[in-house]
Image (cartoon, rainbow, N blue to C red):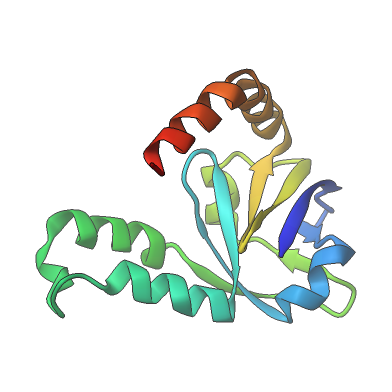
Amino acid sequence: MLIGEYIHTIDEKNRVSMPAKFRKELGRKIIITPGLGQCLFIFTTKEWEKVSQKLSSSDSDLSFLKADQRNFNRYMFGRAAEVEIDSIGRMLIPEFLQEGIRLRDKAAIIGVRDRLEVWNEKAWSEQKEMVSKQAEQLAERLGNESK
């Protein structure tokens, strides 16, 4: 399970060190794609297969006939990139993905169970603050939905 929060500096070659805690679990190849909100999602190749199946499935094999599904799939698949983690644990996040979240000097890498999220450090700080103020209400709503 991927959990925890880590802040890492982006080096002069735009590489980010993957937290040592995650390296073994992720393997050498990962998939980075735009996330929801102001972050990127990182999946193992195995987990990406599961996500791909879910994104492509529908009640029929003709999911491409649904405009919303086509558009979301374009967003997720079209801007996804397969990235290798080098021998000392660094990854090079493609520039077009860095630009999308204004990733500059420092990256917040967050474990969210089955994926990692990469945030601009300032945006992550703001997100944490916002959610911490709403945590009780969010828990209440989520608890009511499961009834």
Q: Is residue 59 placed above or below 19 in the rendered structure?
A: below
Side of 12 where 33 appears, left or right? left
* Percent of width and height locating residue 14: 75, 56
Q: Quadrant of the C terminus?
A: top left
Q: Is residue 130 placed above or below 110 in the rendered structure?
A: above
Question: Which quarter of the picture shows residue 77?
Answer: bottom left
Side of 68 where 3 appears, left or right? right
Side of 130 where 75 appears, left or right? left
* Percent of width and height locating residue 7: 83, 44
Camera-nearest residue between 106 and 116: 116
Camera-nearest residue between 127 and 76: 127
Residue at figure coordinates x 24%, y 56% from the top left: 71
Camera-nearest residue between 45 and 78: 45
Residue at figure coordinates x 78%, y 41% from the top left: 105
Q: Quadrant of the N terminus?
A: bottom right
Count of marks, rendered view: 0
Side of 70 where 116 appears, left or right? right
* Percent of width and height locating residue 17: 83, 60
Residue at figure coordinates x 54%, y 31% from the top left: 139
**Looking at this rendering, what residue extends furthest in the top direction?**
133
Camera-nearest residue between 13 and 36: 36
* Percent of width and height locating residue 93: 65, 61
Question: Which quarter of the picture shows residue 30?
Answer: bottom right
Q: Is residue 7 visible?
A: yes
Q: Is residue 85 visible?
A: no
Residue at figure coordinates x 60%, y 26% from the top left: 135
